[in-house]
C-alpha cells in the first residue's frame, strides 16, 4: 500500500441543484457520456482510497441506483437534510469510525477535476505534514465563493463565505475550490465543534480551516492554475460550458495521440470512447458511449455512433448507429441507420438509405441501396439489390431470414420471414419470396408480364401519350428499341447474371 493512499474520499452530492430546474438530480446530468457524479467518482477512484463515499440526499434513490451501476466500488451515506457541507462530511464519517490517515473531500458537480490533481493534493498534504490542505484558485470574479484569508506571513488562517464576508474580504480573489485533504482525526474532532453561527445558519466545512489554524496546526493552500478543474455546475449554462471544455480536452488528447480531427469544434467524443492512430474524424461527428474506432478508419462527416465498434480502415459517413459492429474495411453510408445486433463483416457494405437491425453481413456482403434488413444473416459475398425489404414482422412475432453465401437478391424484392435462401441462389427482381430457395435455383415470385396491344390508342385517345405512341409506331422506333418495359426487364436479368 502506498503511503499516499487516503483512508477515504468523500464526494458531496446531496444538494438539490435548484438552478438546474430539473426533475433529474443535478449530479445525474451528463457531460461526455458520463454523469457529473460519475466523473467525480472516477477521479476519486484514481487515489485508490480505502473507502469511497458519496453523500446523497436529494434524489437519493436515483443517485444510488446510478452509482450501483457505474461505480459499484463507491458506497453512499445519506444526508437527510442539507444542513451544510460540514454536516454532509459528518454524515459520511458516521459510517467510518476509527479512520486514520488522510480524508479527501470533493464535490459531485465538478466533472473536470482530474485524478492527477487529487494525487498532487494528497502528496503535498503528506509531504508537508499538513492537518488541512485546501485547493484554491485565483479568480477575476470571485463572487459567490468562499475567500481564503491569510495572515501577514501568508499562512492560511480561515475561509470566509461570501455571505459572511466584509467588503474588504470580498475583494480577495483567492477562493476556496471546496476540495480538501484533511487529517482524519483532526477532521472528525473539529466537525463535532462546528456551529451554525453564520449568515446561512449552516454547518460550514470551511470553518474547519479556521479552527485548525487557530490551534496552531499546519494549514496550507495548494493553488491550481487550471481553473476549469474546480468549476462546478449549478445551471445548464455552466453544464454546456463544462461539456464543451471537457470535449475540447478529450479531442485534443486524441489528436496528440495520432487522430486527425478536421473540425474539433463540431466533433464530440465521449470520455469512454477509444480511438486508434490514423483515425480521421470528419466534421459533425459524435462518438458516444463505448464506441471504438480502429486504425485508419474514416468517420464522418455527420455521424452519430453510439456503443459502436468500427474496424480498421472502415469508412462510415452520414450514419446513425447504435450498438453495431462494423468490420475492417467495411463501408457504411451515406444516410444509413444501424441498430443493435448489426454486425458487418470485413469489406461489407451498408449503403445509402439502408436500415439494419439485428442483421449480420458476411465478409464482402453488400446491401448498397434503399433497403431494410431486420433479423437476418447474409452470407459472404452476397448482394442484396436496391429496395429489398426483409419482412421480419408478421404483426405478432419477429422472424429470422437467412441468405447464404454468394447469392443474389434482385431489386425491390420482399423476403418474408421465416425464410431461407441457400448459398449460390438467385431471387428475381420484384419478387415476394415466402418459400425456401435451394442452391443454384432462381426464385421468381411475381405476376407474369402481359402487354395489351393498342390499349393507349383505345383508352387514352387524344392524349399526348397516344400521340407519342403513334409517332413511334410510324417512325419505326418501336421496332428498333422494343417495348421500354420489356427492355428494362431484360436489363435487370442481365445485370443479375453478371454480378
Ligand atoms: C462551498 C464552500 C465555498 C466554496 C464553494 C466552491 C462551504 C460552506 N462553502 O460553497 O467556500 O468556495 O463551495 O464551490 O462549504 N452539499 C451537500 N450537503 C449540504 C450542502 C452542500 O452535500 O448540506 C454539497 C452540494 O451538493 C455541492 C457541494 O456540497 O455539491 C457544495 O455545496 P454548495 O451549497 O454549492 O456550496 P457553496 O455555497 O457553493
Ligand atoms: Ca456550489
Image (cartoon, helix red, strand yellow):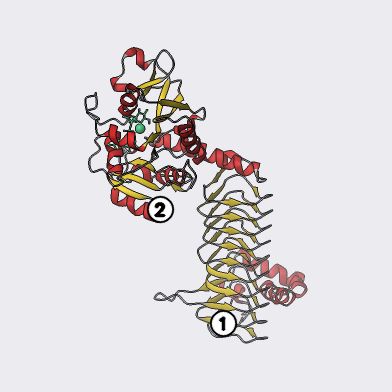
The residue closer to the viewer here, 174 or 299, is 174
Q: Residue at x 68, y 86 (%)?
A: 440
Q: Quadrant of ligand 2?
A: top left
Camera-side residue: 456 or 4?
A: 4
Quadrant (top left, top right, bottom left, bottom right) of the C terminus = bottom right
Question: Is residue 325 left or right of 199 when viewed as pictured?
Answer: right
- Which badge, 1 or 2, comes first in the chain's sequence? 2
Asked whether the residues under the numbered discs 1 and 2 touch, taking CB atoms below 8 Å apart as contact, a structural biologist would say no
Residue 256 position within the rendered picture, expressed as x and y whole percent measured from the top left: 65, 41
In the rendered structure, find residue 73 and report the number of the disc placed on it: 2
Is residue 60 visible in the rendered image? The answer is yes
Q: CA distance from mark 1 to mark 2?
A: 48 Å
The residue depicted at 70 percent of the width and 75 percent of the height is 496
Give the quarter of the image for residue 199: top left
Residue 261 visible in the picture: no
Is residue 222 found left or right of 91 in the rendered image? Answer: right
Q: Which residue is mark 1?
A: 420
Image position, residue 194 (x, y; %) = 25, 30
Amino acid at each position: 500500500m502506498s503511503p499516499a493512499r487516503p483512508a477515504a474520499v468523500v464526494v458531496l452530492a446531496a444538494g438539490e441543484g435548484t438552478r438546474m430546474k430539473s426533475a433529474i438530480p443535478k449530479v445525474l446530468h451528463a457531460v461526455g457520456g458520463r454523469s457529473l457524479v460519475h466523473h467525480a467518482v472516477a477521479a476519486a477512484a484514481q487515489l485508490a482510497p480505502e473507502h469511497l463515499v458519496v453523500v446523497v440526499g436529494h434524489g437519493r434513490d436515483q443517485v444510488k441506483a446510478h452509482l450501483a451501476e457505474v461505480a459499484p466500488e463507491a458506497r453512499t451515506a445519506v444526508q437527510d437534510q442539507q444542513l451544510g457541507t460540514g454536516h454532509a462530511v459528518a454524515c459520511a464519517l458516521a459510517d467510518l469510525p476509527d479512520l486514520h490517515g488522510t480524508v479527501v473531500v470533493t464535490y459531485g458537480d465538478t466533472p473536470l477535476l482530474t485524478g492527477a490533481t487529487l494525487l498532487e493534493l494528497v502528496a503535498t498534504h503528506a509531504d508537508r505534514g499538513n492537518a488541512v490542505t485546501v485547493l484554491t484558485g485565483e479568480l477575476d470574479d470571485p463572487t459567490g465563493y468562499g475567500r481564503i484569508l491569510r495572515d501577514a506571513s501568508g499562512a492560511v488562517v480561515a475561509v470566509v463565505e461570501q455571505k459572511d464576508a466584509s467588503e474588504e474580504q470580498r475583494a480577495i480573489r483567492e477562493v476556496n475550490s471546496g476540495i480538501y485533504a484533511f487529517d482524519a482525526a483532526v477532521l472528525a474532532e473539529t466537525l463535532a465543534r462546528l456551529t451554525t453561527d453564520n449568515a446561512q445558519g449552516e454547518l460550514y466545512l470551511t470553518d474547519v480551516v479556521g479552527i485548525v489554524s487557530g490551534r496552531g496546526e499546519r494549514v496550507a493552500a495548494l493553488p491550481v492554475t487550471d481553473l476549469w478543474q474546480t468549476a462546478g455546475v449549478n445551471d445548464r449554462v455552466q453544464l454546456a460550458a463544462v461539456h464543451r471544455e471537457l470535449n475540447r480536452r478529450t479531442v485534443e488528447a486524441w489528436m496528440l495521440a495520432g487522430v486527425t480531427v478536421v473540425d474539433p469544434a463540431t466533433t464530440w467524443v465521449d470520455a469512454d470512447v477509444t480511438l486508434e492512430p490514423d483515425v480521421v474524424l470528419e466534421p459533425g461527428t459524435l462518438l458516444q458511449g463505448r464506441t471504438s474506432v480502429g486504425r485508419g478508419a474514416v468517420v464522418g462527416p455527420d455521424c452519430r455512433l453510439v456503443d459502436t465498434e468500427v474496424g480498421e480502415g472502415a469508412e462510415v459517413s452520414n450514419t446513425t448507429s447504435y450498438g453495431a459492429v462494423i468490420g475492417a474495411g467495411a463501408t457504411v453510408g451515406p444516410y444509413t441507420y444501424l441498430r443493435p445486433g448489426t454486425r458487418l463483416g470485413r469489406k461489407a457494405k451498408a449503403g445509402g438509405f439502408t436500415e439494419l437491425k439485428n442483421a449480420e453481413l458476411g465478409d464482402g456482403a453488400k446491401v448498397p441501396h434503399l433497403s431494410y434488413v431486420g433479423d437476418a444473416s447474409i452470407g459472404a459475398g452476397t448482394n442484396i439489390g436496391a429496395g429489398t425489404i426483409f419482412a421480419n414482422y408478421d404483426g405478432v412475432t419477429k422472424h429470422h431470414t437467412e441468405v447464404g453465401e454468394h447469392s443474389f437478391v434482385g431489386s425491390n424484392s420482399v423476403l418474408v420471414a421465416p425464410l431461407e435462401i441457400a448459398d449460390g441462389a438467385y431471387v428475381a427482381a420484384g419478387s415476394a419470396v415466402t418459400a425456401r430457395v435451394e442452391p443454384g435455383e432462381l426464385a421468381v415470385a411475381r405476376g407474369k408480364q402481359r402487354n395489351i396491344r393498342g390499349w393507349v390508342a383505345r383508352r387514352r385517345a387524344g392524349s399526348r401519350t397516344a400521340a407519342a405512341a403513334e409517332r413511334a409506331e410510324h417512325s419505326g422506333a418501336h421496332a428498333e428499341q422494343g417495348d421500354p418495359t420489356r427492355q428494362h426487364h431484360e436489363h435487370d436479368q442481365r445485370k443479375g447474371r453478371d454480378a
